[in-house]
Image (cartoon, rainbow, N blue to C red):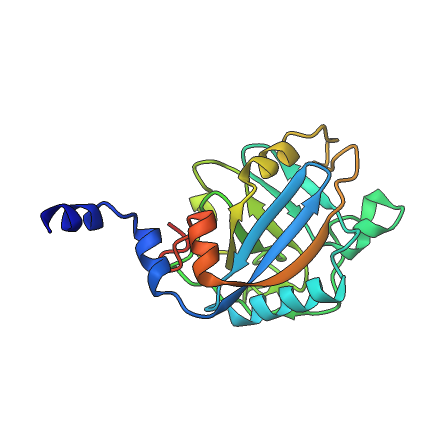
Amino acid sequence: MLCAIVALLFLTPTLVSAQKLKGKDQLVTISTPQGDIKLVLFEDTPKHRENFLKLAKEGFYDGTTFHRIIDGFMIQGGDPNSKDDNPNNDGSGNPGYTIPAEINPIHKHVRGAVAAARMGDQVNPMKESSGSQFYIVENHDGTPMLDEAYTVFGQVVDGLDVIDKIAEQPKNQRDRPLTDIKMKVTVESVKKKKIAKKYKYNYNQPSA
C-alpha cells in the first residue's frame, strides 16, 4: 500500500491532470519546409482562438510565409501579402480587421508562446491585435519584456526544434528569410487527455 502511495506522488502533474481531462481540443499543425509545429489555443482568449481557427479552416494561412525571423527572439507570419511576388510589402498586410486585446497576465511569453502581432501603442493605444499576423517565441528563456503588452493566445506543444531551425535561416537586413518559408495550417479535433499525455502538456498551467 505504501509503495502505491509513493508511486502516485511521483506521477508528473501533467499525467495526473490528463486523467481528469474531458472533452476535445483543436490541435493546430503548421507545416513548413523545416518541419511541423503543433500548438493549442487558449480557451480564455476566445476571440483570438475563434479567429485563428476560422482562418486556418478556411485555408487563409496556406501559402503565407514566416516573413520575419530573429534568431534568439521570435518568428512571425500570417500576412496575406506574403503570398504575392512583392517581398517589400510583407508585414503590412491583414484580413481587413483587428481583434480586441485579450491580454491575460497568466499567459507569459515563454518559449513556444503564440501571440498576436499588432501596431504600436502610438497608433493603437487599445493594443488591438492584427486580424491574422502572429509570432511564436523562439528564445529559450522566453521574452518577458513583452508580457502584458501583446495578447498571448496559444502554446506550441511539439516542434520547438522546428522554430529554432526557422529562426536560423539566412535573412536580409529586414529580417526577411532569403528563401520563402511557406506554411500550411491544418486543424484536427483531438481528446485533451491524449494531447496532455502525448505532448506532456499541462492544461492547468499552459504558460509554465
Q: In this view of the protein, can residue 109 be seen by the observer?
A: no
| Residue appearing at x 71%, y 43% in the figure | 32
User: Residue 174, image x and y in percent?
Assistant: 72, 36
Q: Quadrant of residue 170?
A: top right
**Residue 122 rendering spot, x and y as whole percentages:** 59, 58
Vertical placement of 33 versus 192: above or below?
A: above
Instruction: Tell me what residue is drawn at x 63 percent, y 52 percent.
Output: 29
Rendering coords of residue 84 (x, y %): 87, 50
Q: How many marks?
A: 0
Relative vertical location of residue 140 with respect to residue 23 in this rendering, above or below: above
Give the residue at the far left of this rendering. 2
Residue depicted at 55% across the width and 64% down the height: 125
Residue drawn at 54 percent across, 40 percent down: 160
Residue at the extreme right of the image, as rendered = 85
Whole-percent x and y of residue 145?
A: 44, 45
Q: Is residue 86 above or below residue 71?
A: below
Q: In the shown orientation, is residue 68 left or right of residue 202?
A: right
The answer to whether any part of residue 192 appears in the image is yes
- Quadrant of residue 119 within the rendered picture: bottom right
Does 90 sit left or right of 144 as displayed? Answer: right
Q: Is residue 110 above or below residue 44?
A: above
As rendered, which of 121 and 75 lies closer to the eye?
Answer: 75
**Residue at the limit of the structure toward the front, as seen here:** 1
Give the camera-side residue of 24 and 180. 24
